[in-house]
């Protein structure tokens, strides 16, 4: 999908059909909203009850390596062209090299210091870094993450992804553009205030 195709499809969903002047304004608005719509679409998909749909926007990211303190910077994953959705890290599958058990993500890093047997890795988010421990000690090595991401427009393809994305874009554009009813209501209030 490309931005022009997404914008035109979103405009076709608007009812009643906008005038040509309104369409021109909508094109500008929707083009500005494309990246916000990609983020909103990715978040809605990640939160969906539909496992098949969620899996369409999940991928294995390049490994990150922890330092001697067990901390791995996630910056490269967050700034990639298809970034990790950090908000949904709790749904990600995280593994440490050499350990078959999945990492358990805990909400509070203070619980990472609790003594646990080796082979049961735990992690907590520290801003945009991940602190990983194994057996109560910092884990040093590669960490793999399979998680939700924000797709590029080119990777929003097929009806399962395109249709919901276009709907998100259309809804965002509708919120940004005053409807005729809202505009008329403002005009009526302005006239009433003048009397």
Image (spheres, grey):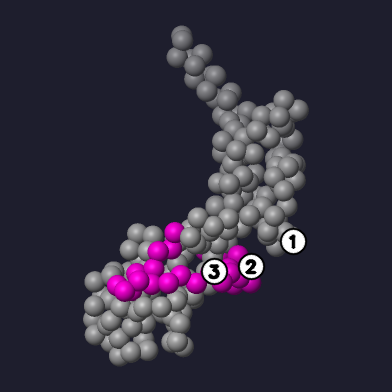
Residue located 27% across and 82% down the image:
136
182 within the magenta span: no
Q: Which residues are magenta?
A: 47-75
Mark 1 to mark 2 CA distance (whole Å): 11 Å
Q: Which residue is mark 1?
A: 158
Q: Position of residue 6 (x, y in %)?
A: 71, 46
Residue located 42% across and 72% down the image:
65
| 30 shown above or below 104 | above
Residue 12's disc number: none
Q: Secondary structure at mark 2?
A: helix
Judged by depth in the image, the label closer to the viewer, 3 or 1, is 3
Q: Earlier in the sequence, mark 3 or mark 2?
A: 2
Q: Which residue is mark 2?
A: 56
Asked where in the image residue 177 lies, by quadrant, the reply is top right
Residue 61's disc number: 3
- 69 and 5: which is toward the camera: 69
Q: Earlier in the sequence, mark 3 or mark 1?
A: 3
Asked whether the residues under the numbered discs 1 and 2 touch, taking CB atoms below 8 Å apart as contact, a structural biologist would say no
Residue located 40% across and 64% down the image:
73
Question: Within 10 Å of the Cα at label 2, are there few (<14), some (14-19), or many (20+) other Cα atoms?
Answer: some
């Amino acid at each position: 999908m490309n931005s022009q195709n997404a914008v035109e499809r979103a405009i076709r969903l608007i009812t009643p059909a906008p005038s040509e002047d309104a369409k021109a304004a909508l094109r500008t608005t929707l083009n500005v909203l494309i990246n916000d719509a990609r983020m909103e679409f990715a978040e809605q998909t990640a939160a969906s009850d539909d496992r098949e749909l969620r899996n369409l926007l999940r991928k294995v990211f390049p490994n990150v390596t922890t330092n001697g303190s067990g901390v791995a910077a996630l910056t490269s994953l967050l700034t990639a062209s298809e970034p990790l959705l950090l908000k949904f890290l709790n749904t990600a599958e995280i593994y440490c090299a050499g350990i078959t058990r999945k990492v358990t993500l805990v909400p509070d890093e203070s619980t990472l210091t609790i003594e646990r047997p080796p082979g049961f890795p735990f992690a907590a988010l520290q801003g945009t870094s991940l602190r990983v421990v194994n057996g109560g000690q910092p884990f040093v090595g590669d960490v793999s993450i399979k998680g939700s991401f924000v797709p590029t427009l080119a990777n929003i393809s097929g009806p399962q992804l395109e249709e919901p994305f276009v709907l998100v874009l259309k809804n965002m554009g509708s919120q940004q553009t005053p409807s005729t009813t809202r505009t008329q209501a403002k005009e009526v209030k302005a006239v009433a205030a003048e009397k």
